[in-house]
Amino acid sequence: MDQNQFAAIMPYISADLVGIIAEKENISENAAITKLYNSELYAILEQEDTKVWHYSTHMLYSLLEQEEKTGKIEFPDV
């Protein structure tokens, strides 16, 4: 995938993930955005070559929970 295509899909992935965070944690969308953007997961997600954007948003949310609980992210084999 080229950088332009990746840049085009990232807002959709981020928006879906923010919605899940806000709903599951009963927080505002602004708080969910802050939480996501301050995470190690997001730093990895915004790098196209990591291919983390291939995961579903529900899987990404699980990884974010894991990061919060353990301070680490263990990516599943896909």
Image (spheres, helix red, strand yellow):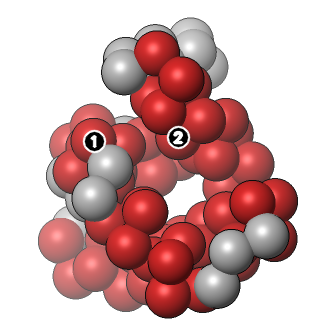
20 or 57: which is nearer to us? 20
Q: Residue at x 79, y 70 (%)?
A: 26
For label 1, the crowd category at 10 Å Cα-Cα, with few meaning under 14, some 14 to 19 and many 20 or more, is some
The residue that label 2 is drawn on is: 64
Give the vertical position of 27 relative to 58 (above or below).
below
Amino acid type of disc 2? Leu
Cα distance in 3D space between marks 1 and 2:
8 Å
Query: Please, is residue 2 above or below residue 75 in the view?
Result: below
Disc 2 secondary structure class = helix
Where's the C terminus, which quadrant? top right
> Hey, which quadrant is residue 35 in on the image?
bottom left
Q: Secondary structure at mark 1?
A: helix
Q: Looking at the image, which residue is at 22% across and 67% down?
A: 2
The circle drawn on residue 40 is 1
The foreground one among 62 and 45 is 62
> At 57% from the left edge and 15% from the top edge, which residue is drawn?
76
